[in-house]
Amino acid sequence: MTAPSANAQIGVTGLAVMGSNIARNFARNGYTVAVHNRSIAKTDALIADHGGDGDFVRTETMAEFAAALERPRRALIMVQAGDATDAVIEELAAVFEPGDIIIDGGNALYTDTIRREASLAERGLLFIGAGISGGEEGALLGPAIMPGGPAESYAAVGPMLEKVAAQVDGEPCCTHIGPDGSGHFVKMVHNGIEYADMQLIGEAYDLMRQALGMSAADMAAVFAEWNNTELASYLIEITAEVLAQVDAKTGKPLVDVIVDEAGQKGTGRWTVKSALDLGIPVTGIAEAVFARALSSSRAQRDAAEGLAAGTLAPAPADPRAFIDDIKAALYASKVVAYAQGFDQIAAGSREYGWNVDPGALATIWRGGCIIRAQFLDRIREAYDAGSDLPSLLLAPYFRDAVESGIDSWRRVVATAAQMGIPVPAFGSSLAYYDGLRAPRLPAALTQGLRDYFGAHTYRRIDEPGSFHTLWSGDHTEVTA
Ligand SMILES: NC(=O)C1=CN([C@@H]2O[C@H](COP(=O)(O)OP(=O)(O)OC[C@H]3O[C@@H](n4cnc5c(N)ncnc54)[C@H](OP(=O)(O)O)[C@@H]3O)[C@@H](O)[C@H]2O)C=CC1
Ligand SMILES: O=C(CO)[C@H](O)[C@H](O)COP(=O)(O)O
């Protein structure tokens, strides 16, 4: 540890799990790191436990923190999103000087990032809103980093961020996403996909548990096996580990003693709200958010437990074949979730003029982050082949993969319905796929009804223009 002398290349304020580990990551990569936390105990714990990782400068106040940083100052904030982030930005802005750079690495709402960047720019301060994914371990060993902000700000901090990010095939899992809120926007959608991915895994688990009566250990073996296939990903890998974990207190599988109510901090919900505003169907993500909400509606669930299930179908006759069907359904639904997420990113990019490169995004999500998966290589290839792809589902590789699994996907959704097992994400993903490929949708009738009750008009398939039928008159059609 060195005494404050304005030589730290980077500062980290907010030293909970993410901040302390990313500070250690910078130090391990040879940077002198000024460290600060609102309560000094966390700063001292970091220095006491991990001071040997590299060169840290311990600071107690924001003034000391600012004084420890070389010019232009670079500070990474890792605190709770929302008011806490605003409070820390204000404290930093009070002691920083024009040209200094503030990076918010928390899970900020992208519209907050847009506001913060504009307001700090008026004060001459540069701002980067950087989505960081990888959890505790990723922060230490190399996360995926999604920084958004002015090119000038990125030039000042990008090389450092790229150095501490995960590396895949010699490429850093960090790239300049675009201006202002773009980094936090793509991190938000990343988290939305994370929600969908976990919900789909949960449904696969529930099918094996309920339809096939498999033990947690047997399911762990299936997920471990799947992790050697096209499904290979961090979430599948850790699912095998969680399912294999035995509770020391009871000797039961840990998963069986965990309360079945899923928490959520907000990024999934924000993704769905933003998708609604942008008009992009992110059905897999939305079902995942709603499934967490349903799981947490304890009182309603308790009251509803005795509701009749009707006549239920027996278990599938061939368990091994059904496991293969579940695998195909999981893969196809996962492709839909990513396709929808990338659609939302494209729409956000158009709306805000960010020019986000989907291929570059797929590249940096290959390592470090929670949704890292082998098939991101395929997503990158798909976008590299043509960034005007109407949907990831139309890229030849994914089209073939989904088409070859479609019968399995239908069997799984039908069997789940017949056995009374809820599979909202599998089901809605299949419905989305069928809707997308349908030559004609029932929206025609919706338009007719809207015209009937609200004179909202409709277009015809055989003539240009807008039309209205005089529903309360003689039912003739007029040009609107
Ligand atoms: N945990 C994870 O897996 C991931 C988290 N993130 C994001 O990274 C950020 C940090 O996450 P995490 O490490 O889990 O920590 P938390 O989100 O739990 O935040 C705790 C930190 O925030 C500080 N803090 C809270 N309120 C204030 C305030 N008003 N003023 C100053 N400091 C304040 C705390 O200081 P004190 O110790 O004094 O209370 C502590 O350092 C969050 O935005 C989170 O969403 C991103 C990716 C993954
Ligand atoms: O950003 C993350 C990973 O990418 C965090 O782990 C995030 O907090 C998870 O969200 P939630 O708590 O809502 O499940």
Image (cartoon, rainbow, N blue to C red):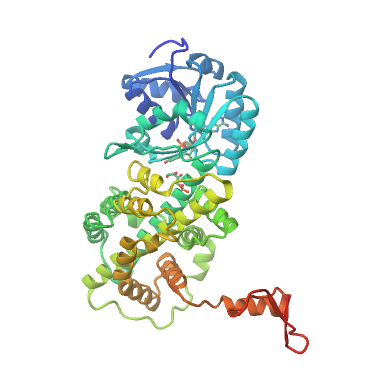
Q: Quadrant of the C terminus?
A: bottom right
Compared to 151, does 348 lie above or below? below
Give the residue drawn at x 38%, y 53%. 383
How many numbered discs, if any? 0
**Residue at point 26% right, 72% down?**
322
Residue 463 shown left or right of residue 269 in the figure: right
Instruction: Report whether residue 209 is seen.
Output: no
Picture quarter with the N terminus: top left
Q: Out of 221 and 108, give the one closest to the viewer.
A: 108
Residue 112 location, quadrant:
top right
Name of the residue lying farthest toward the right? 473
Horizontal and vertical percent position of residue 143: 37, 37
Q: Is residue 321 above or below residue 19?
A: below
Q: Position of residue 227 (x, y in %)?
A: 24, 54
**Residue 135, quarter of picture:** top left
Along the viewing direction, whichever of 460 and 259 lies nearer the viewer: 460
Q: In the picture provided, is 257 more to the left or to the right than 290?
A: left
Residue 165 location (% of width, % of height): 36, 34
Residue at position x 55%, y 30% in the image:
127
Q: Does residue 148 show up?
A: yes
Q: Residue 464 is drawn in which quadrant?
A: bottom right
Comparing 87 with 294, the one in front is 87
Provide residue 190's location: percent of width, then percent of height.
44, 49
Q: Residue furthest front?
A: 463
Location of residue 89 with respect to 259 vertically, above or below: above
Residue at figure coordinates x 40%, y 67% from the top left = 426
Q: Is residue 413 left or right of residue 355?
A: left
